[in-house]
Amino acid sequence: MINIILVGPCGVGKSTIGRELACCRKMIYLDFDKLGILDMNRRRGERSPFSVSNLNFSECLPSIIPKVNNNYFILDIGGGTVFRENVNNFDRVQQLQWVKNKYNPKVIVLYANKEILSQRFLATRSFSEDSLNIIWNNWKKISEPNWKKIGDFFIDTSHLTINSTVEKINEILDQVDLKK
């Protein structure tokens, strides 16, 4: 077994796929964005290493990873959480390299074409087409190029169901486990 980090643009299915994958592989599912909100609420205005502007994986991950009690984890990191305009994205790539060295996860980047993403996004969220365009443009311009630097596997979910995406990830991970 190996640890997994799931990333991708908003609406690609990270959370649903992550929870389903965690269930079938008997792993712990961690939603980075939700954990960050809890941490920020707990700190009541103090600087949080989870915050988008001060993101620091070496501070925030040790606070949640030991809680998995040596079990394997799937960490779902929101699409625009890490790489953004007006932050040091080079530093964030370096931070993610630190995460890979410390926890040895496989980074799986999920993506879909804009039309499919639009259908999923607008069906499950109360956002407008304009919101989607902003998210899509930020993903293509800022996030995707940086995730390409550290991603291990890239899966186009455009024409895959949740179950077939989970099956595909399981096949990839089984091959990785065999190579150990």
Image: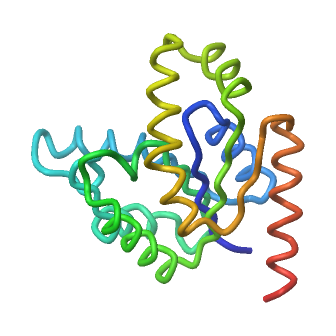
Q: Is residue 120 left or right of residue 164?
A: left
Q: Residue 165, image x and y in percent?
A: 82, 46
Residue at 65% x, 21% y is 118
The total number of labels drawn is 0
Q: Quadrant of the C terminus?
A: bottom right
- Residue at position x 35%, y 47% from top? 84
| 95 w.r.t. 109: above or below | below
Q: Relative to 93, is 145 above or below?
A: above
Q: Position of residue 32 (x, y in %)?
A: 45, 49
The quadrant the N terminus occupies is bottom right
> Which residue is more in the foreground, 143 or 71?
143
Q: Position of residue 178 (x, y in %)?
A: 87, 83
Q: Is residue 27 above or below residue 111?
A: below
Give the residue furthest to the bottom: 180
Question: With 170 as the anchor, is 28 left or right in this view?
Answer: left
* Colouring rule applied to residues: rainbow
Q: Quadrant of residue 9?
A: top right
Image point 10% across, 40% down: which residue?
Answer: 45
91 shown above or below 147: below
Residue that appears at 24% across and 48% down:
86
Find residue 109 and report its horizontal and vertical position in percent: 64, 54
Q: Nearer the viewer, residue 142 or 32?
A: 142
